Amino acid sequence: MLKVSFVILFTFFVLLAYSQVTVSGYVYDAETNEAIIGANIVDTVNSNGTSTNSQAYYSIKTNSTELKVSFIGYETQIIKINQSQNNIQNIYLKPLAYQLDEVVVRIKSNKSVNVAKLELKEIEQIPSLTAQPDVVKSTQILPGIQSQSEASSLLVVRGGDPGQNLFILDNTPLIYVNHLGGFMSVFNPDIINNITIYKSGFPAKFGGKLSSIIDITQRSGSANGFKGSFGIGLTDVNLSLEGKFSDKITYIFTTRKTLFDVLMIAASGLSDGGDYFISYGFHDVNFKSVWKINSRNTISMNLFQGDDYLKIWNKKDDLDLFNSKIKANNIWGSLMGAVSWNSIISPKIFIKTNISYSGYRVKDLQSFNNSINQGFKNKFESKVQEISLNSVWSFNLMRNWTLFGGLHLSHFIYTPYDYKVLGKENYFEVLSEEINNSSISLSNKFKFFKFIETELGARVGNYFLSNSKEFFIEPRFDINFNFNKLGVINFNYMQVSQASHLLISSGNIYVNEIWIPSCKDIPVSSSLQKSLSWSKGFYDNMFSLNIGVYDKELSNLITSEKNVYYLSELENWKQSIETGGVGKVYGLEFMFKKNCGKWTGLISYHLSKSTRKFNNINDGKEFLYEYNRPHDVSIFINRKINKKLSLSLVWNYQSGLPITPVLGRQNVVDPHSNEIYEAFIYGERNSTKMKDYHRLDIGLKYETISKKRKLKTVWTFSIYNAYNRQNPYLYYYNNNSSPEIHRPENGFAKLNLYQISFFPILPSVSYKVYFGKEDINFKGFSLKKWLNFEE
Amino acid sequence: MQKTLLIFAFLIILFSSSCRKLVQDEFEDFNSKITINSIIVQDEQIHLHVSLTNGLDAYELSNINNANIEMYNQDSVLLNFNYVEKGHYISDYIAKENDEFYLKLSVNNSIVSSSCFIPDRVNISEFYIIENAWVDNEGVLQPKINFSIINDLSKDLFFEAYILIYDENVTEVIEEYPILFFDNFELETDIISKSVKISHHFYSNNINNYKYQLIIKSVDFNYYKYVKSFENYNLSRFPDFSNAGIVPTNLFSNINNGYGIFCGYSQTLSDIKASID
């Protein structure tokens, strides 16, 4: 029976493949040579189609002599096909000339709510705290993606933990993605080409994180000569330069640096009450170079480095006889480097291979000196390092069957706690753990009866932990039923595993992110997710509607009873955590979008419930997850007012975060002093909630193009929290008389509940000028002209 | 210029206005319940503290001076308690190893109950102090306490190690604090050995002449759980910006229909020793 089935299946596919040729290649922007991701390639005879992947690669089997290639904002092109043999054909699309009444922003419509795509044009329209586009925050207008807390870049995707999101920058994982403690992300929009966010339906090649994959593709740099941009905002200055080293090699360099470091030193130095100077800042640097060796092969190199730093040191005190000097220097950030090779081996086979290093560390250096002793210097460091080799390939086997495969090898070194007294023999034990992860992935994409498209695959491998080994198999299944007028129905099933865990540790100002590995006592976490969704486009996709439901089960989670760790506890991190946690999340997602025209935007809604259960927490009873927000609504509106001016609004509403209430007060005995004092009686964990969160952000963008110099400038004005809503950041109990937190030693007092809020209304402005080679001419330089005040 | 100043003043007011805000100043009534606090120590009289819980609106918690206390030991002997002051009661009975206590206490019509156990004392088989064993985060050499105790593989045992540090002439306790909580789970040896880093206060002088005494408390499970929860409670009691996600921890209680703790321990004191290099 099995043999008969195999023969029938084989004959079916052979018949399908009959008299067809395979055409493959890359799709580029004709002016900049930039890769075009998501371009549509359609066979003009039977409307069979495909789209370019994140390397702008396509492959299509066709019996037609023509292919229609299209992408939003570009002229549609018809290309001729040589039907006598398979061929490789790179396609260059010409951008459409600017027209006021044409498409402004067309958000690409997706088959399900599991996967979302964002392009730079869209990200640039979304107002932010700093009046500069923020890649990660832009994703938070999508249903099912929430920020962990006010203005934070830590994401909670479909009720998962913030540490369960994998950020991939040009095929390389980036471990830490925040600046300013999470108020900004490290992704510089100047270098971003495209973002794809997977909330479920991970392709088999992706794994290692349970809740989401955020796949960010960077630009390659201009192939048409030197150009760049310079911007300045309230938080930072930024510069981008791009061009070509030769006809085949392009580059792009971007950097950002804070401005307020020096201002903070001056402000703290001038303040009478403070005894210390304080300086805070960040920077990031991105470099990418692409070598298009020939029409088939491309090699690219990526470098990223980004750090935040907080420095505190004391002022000279004339009354201090010992001339004490205290310095604290906190540094945290990431370093990433990668080399990738993309190759079209034959018209049917495409291979992408990538070798990368990615590291994250948080470092705290302290020193103390005075005139009577030698003082001390110490260093705390927590870090993660990853070296990876990834090779993925696609094989366009038949018209209706594409095979995807991959090999993934990673070596991780985790050092959660490394404490050293500098210049002395180190008596502290450094607990480093290593994990080796090897896996293969295989996935089959089939199309049946013109309306069924399915992808069936799995990721299989081993985690070699420090004292044990864990085998994993992660089945992935995705099926789409395209009923044309009735829309697309999608069902998805996937399993994922994760061998790293994020702990939130209390830091000097903000929290620190500490990563710990799975080991013999801490099993690998896993999740199983099922989702069902329906999508439909209206009026030639001017409007689109996505509705979906999902159910997610998480197992072998870790946490602590308090949820936040103190650095001193991390020395014995294995003893201080709770393991074996179970999470349950289910929800409904809704998104209605207007994709083109003068008015664009979306309305998204997420209804969900996320719970956790640990044996030793909350008496073993299930409780609401710390970041459970049952209702989350986002409304985004963009209006192109005229050629120069556009206005954006984002309104966000979220249910308040859960908190553990205080029910009453009791006397307790100190077990060591035997003294009696007052303590709180708390209710069940997370059984009540803070006030609901809502906020309106407004952005106004003013673009001008100088007629003489053809110089483009952009002014962006934004108002964060436009109606000055005091959203709660934390709650605490206190008495009326003192702003200080009430402590038992202060005696009895009537207590009230207070909230602390972070951001009131915050106006912001940024300015950006885009220049080309012809603009770098200092002869007769005029600042007014350069800033484009005069046209 | 004046306009600029006005704008700055407006922004400063906006910034400062939104930081702290009253959310709630009236709370639901909290039904008062009896709270008992008693940690029974072997070879010592038994103390009980009895009070009532109250809501957040209350200005103070009431101590109870008219509690009806019925406490029996394992031999069904009823222990007699006398009221001292401020909710404190004391019994003439001296607690011993292996004592079990059953408590029933009533105030007006409310009744609470609990029980606890005083475990066997443990034998300290080895105890020594290495004076300069490790460097603390300020670069100062600090001592390490090493000790071994006899394990009883037939029982689940819980311990607290406690250190007393005396001056050179053993006339004054300079420092005292718990250094370790541990149990005998998953151990299959007859001896439990531990090595614990300790730190002297930065203002301590002549530390090389200090003398040390180790106390090993054999604690019942209730004491073990209570002290663990007490540590977590204190760490999560005062949230701030750097730990805003912290989740408060309730104190462990083994009082049926009430709050508080009723537990005990026996203790073994080591010889007083000087450190070695």
Image (cartoon, coloured by chain):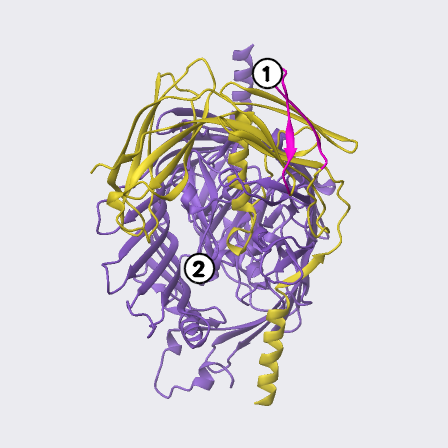
Chain colours: A purple, B yellow
Q: Which residue position holds label 2?
A: A191
Check disc 2 and report its element: helix, strand or loop.
helix
Q: Amino acid at mark 2?
A: Ile
Is residue A701 located in the magenta-colored stretch of the structure? no
Question: Going by the picture, which residue comes out furthest to the top?
Answer: A1
Q: Quarter holding the N terminus of chain A?
A: top right
10 Å crowding of disc 2: few (<14), some (14-19), many (20+): many
Q: Residue at x 43, y 42 (%)?
A: A569
Image position of B7 with respect to A200: above or below: below
For residue A565, side relative to residue B252 (left or right): left
A563 vs B271, left or right, is right
| Residue A311, x across and y down, in percent | 38, 63
Say if A474 sits above or below B155 in the image.
Answer: below
Q: Amino acid at mark 1?
A: Gln
x and y percent of residue A476 in the render?
54, 30
Would residue B68 be counted in the magenta stretch? yes
Label 1: state its secondary structure.
Answer: loop
Residue ranking furthest to the left: B277
Q: Is residue A492 visible?
A: no
Which image quarter: residue A701? bottom right
Residue at image coords 27%, 64%: A370
Q: CA distance from mark 1 to mark 2?
A: 77 Å
